[in-house]
């Protein structure tokens, strides 16, 4: 027969381990522009264990989802005229093999054919009229409202969108996102506040993540002791009942 306390306890330790993995991902990507800090969404471990101890119906504490903090990172000046940052809500639009991708990582470059592409993944950057193309040797300027000027002439506008509701996007790599469902909708931002020559840094605070790592290590050890104590108390009660019937 399965020991529910030990089973739920094991799941509790596993979810803590998955939280640590998210922290490691955050630390590894802390220097990636546009990267958004992620956290594992987990049901409460102590409550599940208490319910199992009291013989209530209990489900194992499992990671239910990943939450990506969309707080804006610091804007860093690069003076590269193909680097772009957004000083307001929204995402640049990329064309990927899965369909549209959305990112705040504005590190862009030109390929051999003059297409504006993302440094991360080499995906075409979309304007309102389609993929952005710059003629060889031309001077390109991006205005704050998103207009693309080639040799002083407005040729297109960089496309910037934002979701109509929270939770509409899911991550591909922490800095590029896609629509979570077919019914999730994104709308164009008319005045996106584009800054040329800047990139948005990751919103990961390394010191906070290290402190969280220390906390999770302590939590893991406490949860392990909690499991052992809960099992010992149950066995002790069983032994007392056995003595009472002798």
Image: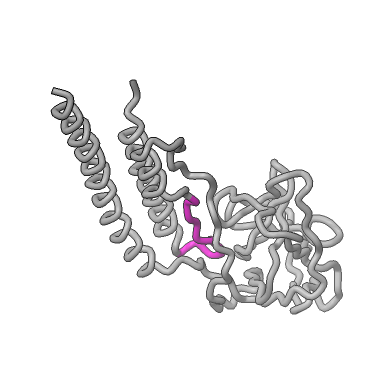
Question: Looking at this rendering, what residue extends furthest in the front direction?
Answer: 245
Asked which quadrant contains residue 186, the reply is bottom right
Q: Position of residue 190 (x, y in %)?
A: 82, 72
Q: Position of residue 91 (x, y in %)?
A: 69, 63
237 with respect to 135 (left or right): left
* Range drawn in magenta: 31-41
The correct choice, above or below, for 57 with respect to 16 in the image is above
For the C terminus, which image quadrant? Answer: top left
Q: Position of residue 155 (x, y in %)?
A: 86, 68
201 with respect to 245 (left or right): right
The correct choice, above or below, for 4 with respect to 15 in the image is above
Magenta segment includes 208:
no
Asked which quadrant contains residue 27, the reply is bottom left
Magenta segment includes 39:
yes
Can residue 21 be seen from the camera position used here?
Answer: no
Q: Position of residue 38 (x, y in %)?
A: 50, 56
**Which is more toward the observer, 218 or 25?**
218
For the N terminus, which image quadrant? Answer: top left
11 with respect to 203 (left or right): left
**Which is more toward the observer, 149 or 221?**
221
The correct choice, above or below, for 75 with respect to 168 in the image is below
Q: Residue at x 63, y 51 (%)?
A: 122
Can residue 50 be seen from the camera position used here?
Answer: yes
Q: Residue at x 77, y 44 (%)?
A: 182
153 with respect to 70 (left or right): right
Question: Looking at this rendering, what residue extends furthest in the top direction?
Answer: 1
Q: Residue at x 18, y 36 (%)?
A: 236
Q: Main secondary structure of the magenta part?
A: loop
């Amino acid at each position: 027969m399965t020991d529910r306390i030990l089973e739920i306890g094991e799941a509790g330790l596993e979810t803590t381990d998955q939280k640590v993995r998210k922290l490691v991902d955050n630390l590894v990507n802390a220097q990636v522009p546009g990267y958004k800090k992620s956290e594992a969404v987990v049901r409460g471990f102590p409550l599940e264990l208490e319910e199992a101890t009291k013989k209530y119906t209990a489900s194992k504490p499992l990671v239910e989802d990943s939450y990506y903090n969309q707080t804006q990172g610091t804007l860093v000046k690069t003076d590269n005229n193909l680097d772009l940052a957004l000083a307001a809500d929204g995402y640049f639009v990329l064309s990927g093999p899965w369909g549209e991708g959305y990112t705040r990582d504005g590190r862009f470059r030109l390929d051999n054919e003059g297409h504006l592409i993302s440094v991360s993944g080499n995906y075409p950057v979309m304007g309102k009229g389609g993929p952005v193309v710059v003629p060889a040797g031309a001077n390109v300027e991006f205005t704050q409202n998103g207009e693309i000027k080639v040799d002083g002439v407005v040729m297109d506008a960089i496309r910037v969108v934002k979701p109509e509701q929270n939770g509409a996007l899911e991550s591909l790599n922490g800095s590029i996102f896609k629509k979570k469902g077919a019914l999730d909708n994104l709308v164009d931002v008319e005045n996106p506040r584009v800054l040329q020559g800047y990139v948005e840094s990751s919103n990961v605070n390394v010191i906070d993540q290290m402190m969280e790592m220390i906390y999770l290590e302590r939590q893991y050890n406490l949860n392990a002791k909690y499991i052992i104590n809960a099992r010992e108390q149950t066995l002790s009660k069983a032994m007392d009942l056995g003595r009472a019937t002798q």
